[in-house]
């Protein structure tokens, strides 16, 4: 919090934070009137909402499917394979994504050409860059997030399943009426965290996949702040951007938490 005051000063490293001159909301005015911030904010929201819409349900569905698997070895194999990408850095994962989607030697384009289609430069295409970002994020995080939901499923009383089976409930009905209601509080908590992260893009992922051809659709707040704050050394302006993002995240979490408490009775506080 001490460093947050840089956003309200003309900060010079030579004189330090305390001795730098106060300028009020100068950098925030520059932020909201700048021509590059709003496109970065728009891209951040589009990509984040895409991750929320497609990425949030994915671990829930995968955990439900894994919970129904009765073959222990197969279940553990699937869990290991889906967990593994989470422990690999985006520097490595981005290289794998670019190789797999390469228009000249990538597996995906090789398959497309087998069907008589032209190769696509996915990472360098404005139409495909955002789907690549969303898809690669799901590939990395879906398996790891299933840990939370599988743990919640194990907390459900097994007698409920036995009673439902005796009453003639099908497997799908048991999932719909026992498993999903049983993990609903966990789903709500995870959703609150996900909504709070809408404005907080995954800098490591996008920075390693971003290129000049897709800056218009791929430049997000994280990469924008990096350019302004580190490359241009405008630390005060970059701090103002970061403070704005944090305030928006706090508002989103607070609103979602209150709405969740009112509608479902489950909340963080």
Image: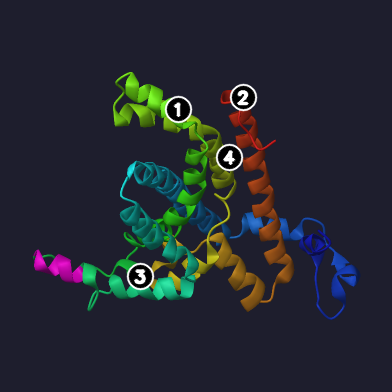
- For the residues carrying marks 1 and 2, which lies nearer the camera in this image? 1
Q: Secondary structure at mark 3?
A: helix
Image height check: is 129 above or below 14?
A: above
Question: Residue 189: which numbered mark, if any?
Answer: 4
Give the residue at mark 1: 159
Mark 3 or 2, nearer chain start? 3
Real-space Cα distance between discs 4 and 3?
A: 31 Å
Q: Nearer the viewer, mark 4 or mark 3?
A: 4
**Residue 242 sits above or below residue 148 on the image:** below
Please state the horizontal and vertical placement of residue 28, each as a whole percent of the image.
71, 56
Could one spot residue 113 in this view of the protein?
yes
Check whether the beta carbons of the residues at disc 1 and disc 4 lie within 8 A of each other.
no
Is 45 placed left or right of 2 in the picture? Answer: left
Expressed as whole percent of the image width and height from the top left, the position of residue 79 reads 39, 56
Q: In terms of depth relative to the viewer, which is nearer, 55 or 265?
A: 265
Residue 262: give its label: 2
Circle 1 — which element?
A: helix
Cα–Cα gap, marks 3 and 2: 42 Å
Name which residue lies at 32% across and 45% down: 70
- Along the horizontal axis of the image, is 25 left or right of 35? right
Q: Earlier in the sequence, mark 4 or mark 3?
A: 3
For marks 1 and 4, give the CA distance. Answer: 26 Å
Locate the N terminus and report the quarter of the image it occupies.
Answer: bottom right
Q: Quadrant of residue 7?
A: bottom right
> Residue reaching furthest right?
19
Q: Label 3 belongs to which residue?
A: 97
Query: Measuring 63% from the left and 34% from the top, which residue is drawn there?
Result: 267
Mark 4 and mark 2 lie on one chain; the one further toward the N terminus is 4
Compared across the picture, whether 152 is left or right of 1 comes to left
SS class, disc 2: helix
């Amino acid at each position: 919090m001490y460093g947050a005051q840089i956003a309200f000063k003309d900060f010079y490293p030579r004189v330090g934070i305390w001795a730098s001159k106060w300028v009020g909301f100068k950098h925030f005015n520059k932020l909201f009137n700048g021509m590059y911030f709003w496109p970065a904010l728009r891209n951040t929201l589009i990509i984040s909402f895409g991750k929320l819409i497609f990425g949030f349900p994915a671990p829930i569905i995968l955990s439900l499917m894994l919970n129904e698997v009765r073959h222990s070895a197969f279940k553990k194999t699937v869990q290991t394979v889906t967990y593994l990408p989470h422990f690999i850095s985006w520097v490595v994962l981005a290289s794998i994504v670019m190789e797999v989607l390469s228009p000249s030697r990538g597996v995906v384009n090789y398959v497309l050409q087998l069907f008589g289609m032209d190769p696509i430069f996915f990472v360098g295409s404005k139409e495909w860059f955002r789907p690549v970002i969303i898809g690669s994020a799901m590939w990395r995080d879906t398996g790891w997030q299933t840990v939370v939901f599988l743990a919640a499923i194990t907390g459900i009383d097994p007698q409920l399943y036995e009673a439902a089976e005796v009453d003639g409930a099908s497997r799908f009905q048991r999932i719909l009426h026992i498993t999903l209601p049983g993990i609903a509080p966990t789903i709500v908590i995870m959703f609150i965290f996900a909504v709070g992260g809408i404005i907080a893009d995954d800098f490591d992922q996008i920075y390693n996949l971003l290129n000049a051809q897709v800056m218009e659709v791929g430049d997000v707040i994280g990469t924008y702040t990096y350019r302004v704050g580190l490359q241009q050394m405008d630390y005060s302006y970059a701090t103002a951007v970061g403070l704005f993002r944090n305030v928006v995240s706090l508002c989103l979490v607070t609103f979602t938490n209150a709405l969740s408490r009112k509608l479902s009775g489950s909340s963080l506080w």
